[in-house]
Image (cartoon, rainbow, N blue to C red):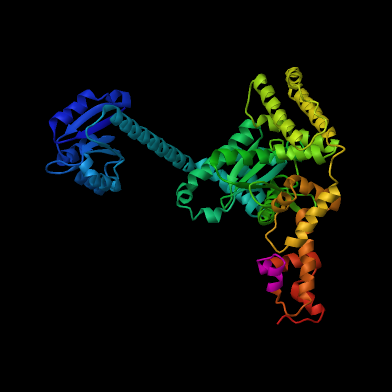
Amino acid sequence: MHKVLIVDDEKEIREGLKTVFPWAECGVAGVHTAEDGEEALMLVERLNPDVIVTDIKMNRMSGLELIGRLQETGRFTGKTIVISGYDDFDLVKQAMKLGAADYILKPIQIAELKQVVHRAVAEIREERTLEQNQRMLENQLRQAVPRLKEEVLRELIDRAPDPYGTTRIKHRLKTLDLEWMLEDRMVLMVAEVDDAAALEQNKRYKREKELISFAIGNVAEMVVREECGYTAELFQDKEERWVIAISRRPHVAQSAYAGLAKLLIDKINANVKVNMTIALASSVGEWNRLFDLYREAIDTLELKALYGGNQLLITDEKGNDSVDSEVSLSNIKEVLDLIRYGSESDIREAMSAFPVFVRTWSLSSLREIQGRLFDWLFELIKEASAAGCKDPWWEGNLLSIWDQIEQFDTLESLQNQMTAYLLRLASGFDQRKPSQNLILTEAEKYIQAHYRDNLTLQVVARQICITPVWLSKLFKKEKQVTFLEYLTRVRIEHAKIRLADARFRIYQVGLEVGYGNPEHFTKTFKKAVGCTPKEYRNQRGIADE
């Protein structure tokens, strides 16, 4: 319960407010009074009230002076409500500038004052809850064990293990209850807030950065360990990216971990309100390979500039960086493209992530899960109908579909039934599927026309009305290259043409073909051609003046 101090030089008003107003309904237990600002200052020292209700004009020390003095001393952290007549509204403005929380005009209406006091008390409670959370965060950060865990985990990713340090590392892992890391192979992913440097310029983000980071960790912990039940360790690297090392379960496909990463992105978007990109290393490894897996993931994160952020980026076994081409079952547009352009094997492969997809709902009732699946299927049916599915078998049949879903009560049987529905929808597109070569031709035309621009997979996909996942799949399937490899190939070919023209400086060539960073252009050119742009010119007898 809270305490209130009423300050007014008119005894009738002062005592009337104390006795008539329903303070208890506002969560107030103690009500005290003062006849002017000077007396109020002394009572504030002794009583430490939560709310002060003061007249703006009084003898000796006015309410305005009182607020100013309270601000100077900094000892009062509660809320101040000023009472004023219509003629004194300029004084109210001054009071608000000095930190008054609210005001009420004379004559005082009990209902209006009740609203104002309720609001002030609610704000106090909210602020104290935030302060309490902040203290809890600080206490947790001060705990020794998490800090020691972070130190040893950072050591694993910051430098390759050496024979002399192996014994020490193993001992520390055992001591800190991380012995499972010595026994299991691990999947590694690294999560990074998008545009973090730009966000640092935002005062709110800068002020709450620690809380935001803590919230991201909490969400990741909940998703990885509690919702999906993985054995894992989560920690931050030196750049404050979140690193997640997960015990690799036997017989679990890599696509399941991709699904986990996408679920994590969705949860962070919804709960923390920040965009985040996750890089998933392509291979698995024991504790002494975490350094290599981490480097691979960090290199992949840099591809945000080409593929866009707030998504999962992966590397294939050959080390080719790309956007994840696994279909997200939670993204209806991607599922629609799956049934429009994919084969039966594509659909069955995508549905292997069905168990993780269902767990994202955090539902425990079979009826709720069945209902959510029906809603998901109904949304997909509407999209398929709008896209021209020619076999509207669902029309007048929705109740029958619901009856069928109700017949299944295991995850496996529900997965099989949903897969059957997707295959049925796909059959309605079989005769109308656009040629995959035609889609790629449109993409290639756009890339050839805009390779100088800051192209990403998302940009090109949007231009040709297809989801990024399926454009990525088509490049890999039909061209045997990733989107980035194709874009790089186009840019390098145009760079060769310009390098043959001595009028262009090398940095100008880079800019002309879409590389704003000269070092990145040189590195990319050498990787593709086998020599630097300068060496390429020298081989052809062209000087870069």
**To which quarter of the image does residue 5 belong?**
top left
Q: How many marks?
A: 0
Q: Position of residue 59 (x, y in %)?
A: 12, 41
Residue pushed farthest right? Answer: 431
**Side (left or right) of 261 relative to 542:** left
Rendered view: 352 above or below 493: above
**To which quarter of the image does residue 525 belong?**
bottom right
Residue located at (74% from left, 64% from top):
524
Rendered view: 361 above or below 58: above
**Side (left or right) of 367 relative to 133:** right
The range drawn in magenta is 507-519
In the rendered image, residue 232 lying in the magenta stretch gets the answer no
Q: Position of residue 261 (x, y in %)?
A: 67, 41
Rendered view: 133 above or below 242: above
Relative to the observer, which residue lies in front, 163 or 335? 335
Residue located at (68% from left, 38% from top):
260
Magenta span: chief secondary structure: helix
In this orientation, does residue 105 appear?
Answer: yes
In this orientation, does residue 161 appear?
Answer: no
**To which quarter of the image does residue 224 belong?**
top right
Quarter of the figure with the C terminus: bottom right
Quarter of the figure with the N terminus: top left
Relative to the observer, which residue lies in front, 470 or 441? 441
Residue located at (59% from left, 37% from top):
221
Residue located at (84% from left, 47% from top):
436
Q: Position of residue 204 (x, y in %)?
A: 46, 49
Q: Position of residue 303 (x, y in %)?
A: 68, 55
